[in-house]
Image (cartoon, rainbow, N blue to C red):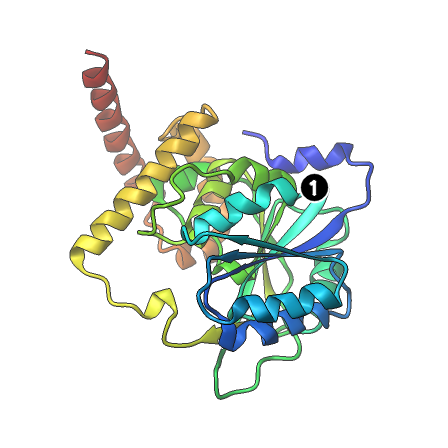
Amino acid sequence: MRGLRLIRLIRFMQIKYLCLINNYNNEAFLRECLDSVYSQSHPFDLVILIDDGSTDASERIISEFAKRYQNFQFIKKPNEGQFSTFNAALPFISDHTQIFLLDGDDIFPLDYLELTIRLLGNQGWDFAFCEQQVFLNSSTPPNTALISDQLPHFFSTTSALTRSRGCWIGNPTSCISVSSELFKKIFPYPHYRDRSFWADNLIIYASSILGAEKVHIPSLGVGWRDHASNDGKKSYSVEDISVKEHAINQAFEWYCSKYGIPRYPGFFEFLAEYHNLGDYWQKRLDLPSAYRMFNRLIRKSIKQFLINKIKRN
């Protein structure tokens, strides 16, 4: 499977940089979020904010910025969940664009875009993710994105690993930037009303399944706000977890079916990606030995074969 980066070999237009913000009832944080975007040392060419039917004072704050900046686009829609905001943004995203995702309660340090371009170059990338700089409401958000001197890590494709093991190679939404080509392959997602799992999961899994070449930028971190409404702080029952796993599997099945990708990979495809990860990422993803994973892959392939046979009969 060839990575999406091949698309960029034929580019002839200058890449544009887009900040795509999703918002729902973040009036307490939204002005700080938008100020961080418009204070970048390297400015964004376009800022699009999708409001998912907020019932607080978000729209008043958004309208202030819309009047102040010509490169600001505001899209208001009924409340249908975070997935739906990305579907709604699709018609407004042009080709040859790098999309930087941002939740309405987080912030970009003032040099985030500049440093990302400096580290990755201006030729574009499929999928990049950096780290989180966690801050509390009572603390000062980070002013600089630089957190270490580590160099970016460029992955080969991770489709087989993800289809086999569900490898989660990424970070929360505000840490992610993707190409417009990849974004248009991921969205629109038809099961957008399913709120049992999170948008970053969908983007991270789908990117790998589709063969995107990912890059990790460990030296940079965005401002990730730690507050009571974060999804990760909510309590989830056994039933909630089961529903979430079903929704994730549904997403896997949908992308594999749409793009003609086998639900479970062949062993040699899987083994190549496993070795390309290297020791650090094998440990970070808590992967067992290649032998144990081969046995598991064989069992899954046999199970899927039998399921397909029953369906045909």
Q: Is residue 65 left or right of residue 275?
A: right
Q: Nearer the viewer, residue 135 or 120?
A: 135
* SS assignment at label 1: loop
Name the residue rendered at 32%, 49% in the picture: 288
Q: How many marks?
A: 1
Q: Residues within 10 Å of mark 1 (few under 14, many from 20)?
A: few
Name which residue type carries label 1: Ser
Q: Nearer the viewer, residue 261 or 33?
A: 33
Q: Is residue 166 above or below residue 12?
A: below
Q: Is residue 92 left or right of residue 69?
A: left
Q: Is residue 304 above or below residue 18?
A: above
Residue 199, position as x, y percentages in the image: 44, 52
Regarding residue 149, the answer to whether it shows in the image is: no
Quadrant of the frame with the C terminus: top left
Q: Is residue 169 left or right of residue 154?
A: left
Quadrant of the frame with the N terminus: top right
Name the residue rendered at 33%, 44% in the picture: 248
Q: Nearer the viewer, residue 284 or 57?
A: 57
Residue 289, position as x, y percentages in the image: 33, 47
Residue 179, position as x, y percentages in the image: 64, 45
Residue pointed to by mark 1: 94
Q: Is residue 232 left or right of residue 128?
A: left
Residue 271, position as x, y percentages in the image: 43, 36
